[in-house]
Image: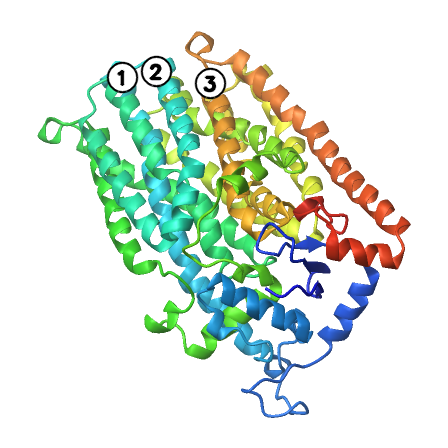
């Protein structure tokens, strides 16, 4: 690495890429900046039509707007920037470095086609893998409707303990799994994970009582942990930052579709009760565990180490792969500063854990999903408690999954459209508080239909998981920390799941008045929390801007080149709120 210092400006996001020879992290970090000069220059560069080796002429006549050259901002127009990243990509042995081409151009039509093909291949594969995750961690709800607890002589508290063990073990494996997958490669690690947990999940058909139930839940969770963060990393390789949140929402939409399909499938499987002397839930675990095993084996063929492999598989042309690589690098050049077999250091993990500027979002992840999780896991028990049959219970689970899908897509798209996170998330308590209040104070006098309606509205309420995952990613301040911060966030969400698993207790049954009181207070607490987070990030940005504005141009330039601040601690970084 040369001793030259560069002020590298990403005109696509108003971000400054600064490099010094004294940097501790591969001489490179991403820093968002709100700078009018940069915005003006971005507009200038955006108006330039870039013509590469595949274009005929700058003054080419186009049949339609779609045939025009895609003029998305290109930070590599600056020769110093292009040279710096060429050196960086070679040094990191970035697997797609041979396709990096600052002068390469393509049409808007080609860009749209590539995104659609990536959706139909990469995003589809990710959703299929997520299907395997949900099948084996979600089928317990259907088993509950088939007298699972009674057959194994389990109490409600035993059920809670099993859920708690599941979440604790999921948390324990989250960061180790993320580290291993980054080192071994997502394309190798995920299939191993899926095959391993599918075997354990299928073996639940041999459960004999409390302790085998506890063991099965713990092993399944530990083997499943890390998959969500791994899929986020996998998808981020193929999409721009603005395109990623809605694709992440597709994962949780898939979750709900799997729950709907699982509920319908269980209607048939649970009728096998008595066949070969087995209860219906035993057949459920065996059949659905075997389905995940098939997906796990297929994952070896679905997952690829990098976009380069798309050509080898015959899924994309060489030109299309080159478009994928260059469009994502221009959106975020740091995506090439590591290769797909590089590990994550303990120092990076510790730095993310100690990053207090991410704690507010972690706190949202801790409590925001407790009301939804509590009702979702207890709906089968509540429905059976009011006299509904196994068939009716599983059929009546479907509407809240549909509602969940609707809210998830709406909230994610709305957040991106108005470019707001906290203010969109606050719609969650606005929606939940009055419904939970009615559920708490009127449940004794509610009919079966009323109980079903309110529990469906709560369990299917606004879901902001995709918003929060992308929020953490944006506020991490560096691509190398995003995998870890995503894992930490998901770990915190599981901690919230532990709380949710213990809200309803046996001594509070059947109406769970104490539990509903707790849910009401938790939902209400989201109001001040989200407003405080919005204010916190605005204040942090204002303080940074005030200090920045008080500096002379020479001081600003010296800071950019020589500061030891990094990531989101830099004065020229701005937090998303």
Q: Residue furthest left?
A: 276
Q: From where the camera sits, is residue 437 visible? A: no
The first of marks 1 and 3 along the sequence is 1
Q: Where is residue 544 in the image (x, y as percent from the top left)?
A: 80, 45
Against 364, residue 181 (above or below) is: below
Q: Where is residue 364 in the image (x, y as percent from the top left)?
A: 61, 33
Q: Is mark 2 on a helix, strand or loop?
A: helix
Residue sitting nearer the eye, 82 or 272: 82
Residue sitting nearer the eye, 14 or 334: 334
Q: In which quarter of the image is residue 81?
A: bottom right
Q: Badge 3 is on which residue?
A: 502
Q: Position of residue 253 (x, y in %)?
A: 47, 47
Inter-mark Cα distance, 1 to 3: 17 Å
Q: Quadrant of residue 394?
A: top left
Q: Badge 2 is on which residue?
A: 158
Is there a contact, CB below 8 Å, between mark 2 and mark 3? no
Against 90, residue 164 (above or below) is: above
Q: Position of residue 550 (x, y in %)?
A: 90, 49
Q: Badge 1 is on which residue?
A: 210
Q: From where the camera sits, is residue 160 visible? A: yes
Q: Quadrant of the N terminus?
A: bottom right
Q: In which quarter of the image is the C terminus?
A: top right
Is there a contact, CB below 8 Å, between mark 2 and mark 1? yes
Residue sitting nearer the eye, 266 or 120: 120
């Amino acid at each position: 690495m040369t001793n030259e210092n560069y002020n590298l400006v990403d005109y696509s996001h108003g971000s400054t890429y600064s490099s010094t020879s004294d940097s501790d992290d591969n001489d490179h970090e991403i820093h968002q900046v709100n700078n009018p000069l940069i915005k003006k220059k971005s507009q200038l560069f955006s108006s330039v039509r870039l013509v590469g080796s595949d274009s005929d002429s700058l003054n080419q006549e186009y049949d339609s707007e779609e045939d025009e050259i895609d003029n998305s901002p290109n930070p590599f127009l600056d020769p110093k920037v292009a040279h710096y990243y060429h050196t960086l990509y070679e040094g990191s042995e970035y697997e797609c470095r041979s396709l990096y081409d600052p002068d390469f151009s393509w049409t808007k039509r080609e860009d749209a086609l590539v995104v659609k093909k990536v959706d139909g291949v990469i995003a589809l594969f990710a959703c299929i893998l997520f299907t395997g995750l949900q099948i084996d961690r979600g089928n317990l709800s259907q088993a509950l409707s088939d007298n699972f607890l009674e057959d194994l002589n389990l109490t409600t508290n035993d059920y809670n303990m099993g859920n708690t063990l599941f979440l604790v073990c999921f948390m324990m494996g989250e960061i180790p799994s993320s580290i291993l997958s980054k080192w071994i490669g997502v394309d190798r690690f995920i299939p191993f994970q899926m095959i391993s947990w599918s075997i354990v999940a299928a073996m639940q058909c041999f459960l004999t009582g409390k302790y085998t139930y506890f063991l099965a839940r713990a092993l399944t969770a530990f083997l499943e942990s890390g998959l969500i963060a791994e899929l986020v990393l996998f998808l981020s390789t193929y999409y721009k930052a603005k395109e990623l949140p809605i694709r992440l929402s597709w994962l949780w939409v898939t979750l709900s579709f799997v729950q709907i399909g699982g509920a319908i499938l269980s209607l048939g499987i649970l009728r096998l009760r008595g066949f070969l002397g087995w209860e219906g839930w035993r057949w459920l675990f065996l059949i659905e565990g075997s389905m995940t095993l098939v997906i796990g084996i297929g994952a070896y063929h679905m997952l690829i180490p990098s976009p380069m492999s798309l050509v080898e598989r015959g899924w994309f042309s060489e030109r299309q792969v080159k478009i994928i690589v260059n469009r994502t690098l221009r959106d975020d050049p740091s995506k090439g500063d590591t290769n797909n077999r590089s590990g994550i250091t303990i120092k990076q993990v510790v730095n993310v854990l100690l990053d207090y500027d991410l704690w507010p979002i972690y706190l949202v992840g801790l409590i925001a999903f407790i009301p939804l999780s509590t009702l979702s896991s207890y709906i089968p028990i509540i429905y059976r408690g009011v006299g509904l049959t196994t068939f009716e219970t599983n059929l009546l689970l479907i509407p809240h999954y549909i509602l969940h899908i609707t809210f998830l897509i709406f909230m994610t798209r709305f957040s991106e459209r108005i470019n707001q996170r906290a203010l969109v998330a606050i719609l969650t308590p606005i929606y939940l508080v009055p419904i939970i209040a009615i559920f708490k104070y009127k449940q004794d006098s509610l009919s079966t239909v009323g109980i079903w309606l309110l529990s469906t509205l709560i369990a299917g309420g606004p879901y902001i998981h995709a918003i929060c995952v992308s929020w953490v990613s944006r506020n991490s301040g560096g691509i190398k920390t995003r995998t870890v911060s995503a894992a930490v966030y998901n770990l915190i969400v599981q901690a919230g799941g532990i709380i949710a698993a213990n809200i309803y207790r046996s001594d509070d049954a059947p109406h769970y008045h104490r539990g509903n009181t707790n849910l009401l207070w938790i939902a209400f607490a989201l109001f001040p929390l989200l407003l405080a987070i919005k204010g916190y990030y605005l204040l942090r940005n204002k303080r940074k801007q005030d200090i920045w504005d008080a500096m002379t141009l020479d001081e600003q330039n010296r800071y950019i080149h020589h500061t030891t601040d990094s990531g989101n601690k830099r004065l020229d970084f701005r937090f998303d709120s």
